[in-house]
Image: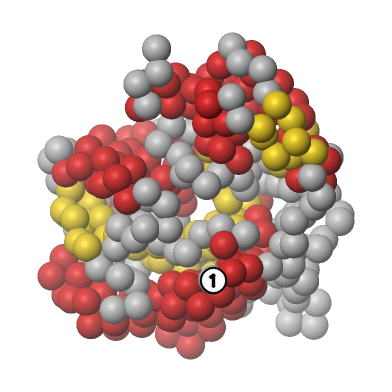
């Protein structure tokens, strides 16, 4: 699907609502849609989970773009969210806003219920009552939980979460499916795998490691560095999203209720992995960052943290069949772009 194909299929008559537009992925997605001439209503509450100045900087860049409208609304504000739908009439919604972070969920569990459960219910209700034609929402690779079979496939069971964050993302998939069944709401869940790149979240490992390298502080490597992640460059994530926005799922006529496939349904609901379909050693990541920054890491090897998993690895064959695309940015190439941005944003010569 070419640039003009997906943009034409989305259309320019009504805006796409992007929740979490001042967040990492939401910012990049909004930029991509605006560059294609598609109007965007960006919703964000600009909370202080991490430095709001980074969120404000992303938002301000979007406000400089024609076609962008910003709404500061919290997902838990049912009336405020309904007002956004009433004022702007979006038919396609990309829901990326959430309380993120596995480790934060160990100490602040209520934040996850407020944003990821109550907030998601409010999104579903607004989409239902405004007759949205497609809800695309962020799930997470964390739903695979304690699964040891690699790569993770959308046909795998995801019934054993190892963090509350993962449980809320699994709950989102179940909630969306129920609305697809009950009200015919077409919905697509996207399981993102360890997204990184310019304008990234400061609580993610790549940002934390890079900051520590430039400041000469130790890098904590959990499970004594024996971790593998499927690092996915943010532009690849966005490419997958924009190709899926105009492709609202239809009921699967071949769905077998006696042998149910978790990846599909009799309802208009689907889930896809979006990952780089590669396993990268955490120690190799650190070595690449050392090379790119010209600094030597001080490695601090520590035990695995509760809620973590040893490895993630995406099977993206379902995504490739659906939209003819699979992420392919090599890790070193994506890291080089990230480090260039990091140095510029933080004034490092």
Question: Residue beneath label 1, please?
Answer: 108
Provide residue 250's location: percent of width, then percent of height: 51, 68
Secondary element at image label 1: loop
Provide residue 124's location: percent of width, then percent of height: 40, 77
For the point 13% across and 70% down, the residue is 87
- Can you tell which quarter of the image residue 20 is in? bottom left
| Residue 326 visible in rendering | no
Give the answer, above or below, for where 296 lies relative to 284. above
Give the answer, above or below, for where 129 lies relative to 155. below
Give the answer, above or below, for where 187 lies relative to 334. below
**Quadrant of the image containing the C terminus:** top left
Residue found at the far bottom of this picture: 182
For the point 47% across and 68% down, the residue is 187
- Label 1 crowding class (10 Å Cα cut-off): few <14, some 14-19, many 20+? few
For the point 82% across and 61% down, the residue is 147
Q: Is residue 190 left or right of residue 125?
A: right
């Amino acid at each position: 699907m070419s640039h003009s194909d997906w943009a034409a299929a989305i259309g320019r008559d009504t805006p796409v609502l992007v929740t979490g537009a001042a967040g990492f992925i939401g910012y990049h997605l909004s930029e991509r849609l605006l560059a294609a001439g598609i109007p965007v209503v960006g919703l964000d509450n600009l909370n202080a989970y991490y430095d709001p100045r980074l969120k404000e900087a992303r938002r301000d860049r979007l406000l400089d773009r024609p076609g962008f409208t910003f709404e500061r609304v919290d997902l838990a504000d049912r009336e405020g969210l309904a007002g956004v739908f009433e004022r702007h009439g979006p038919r396609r919604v990309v829901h990326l806003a959430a309380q993120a972070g596995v480790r934060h969920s160990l100490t602040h569990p209520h934040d996850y219920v407020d944003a990821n459960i109550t907030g998601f219910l409010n999104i579903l209700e607004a989409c239902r009552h405004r007759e949205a034609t497609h809800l695309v929402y962020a799930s997470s690779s964390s739903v695979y939980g304690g699964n040891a079979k690699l790569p993770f496939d959308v046909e795998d069971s995801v019934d054993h979460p190892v963090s509350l964050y993962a449980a809320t993302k699994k709950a989102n998939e179940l909630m969306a499916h129920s609305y697809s069944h009950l009200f015919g709401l077409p919905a697509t869940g996207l399981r993102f795998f360890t997204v990184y790149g310019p304008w990234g979240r400061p609580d993610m490992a790549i940002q934390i490691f890079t900051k520590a390298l430039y400041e000469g502080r130790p890098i904590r490597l959990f499970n004594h560095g024996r971790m593998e992640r499927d690092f996915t460059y943010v532009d690849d994530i966005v490419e997958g999203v924009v190709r899926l926005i105009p492709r609202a799922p239809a009921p699967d006529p071949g769905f077998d209720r006696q042998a149910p496939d978790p990846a599909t349904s009799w309802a208009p609901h689907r889930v896809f992995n979006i990952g780089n379909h590669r396993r990268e050693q955490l120690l190799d990541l650190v070595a690449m960052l050392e090379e790119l920054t010209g600094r030597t890491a001080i490695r601090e090897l520590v035990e695995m943290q509760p809620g973590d998993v040893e490895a993630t690895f995406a099977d993206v064959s379902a995504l490739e069949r659906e939209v003819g695309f699979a992420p392919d940015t090599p890790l070193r190439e994506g890291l080089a772009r990230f480090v260039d941005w990091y140095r510029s944003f933080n004034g490092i010569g």
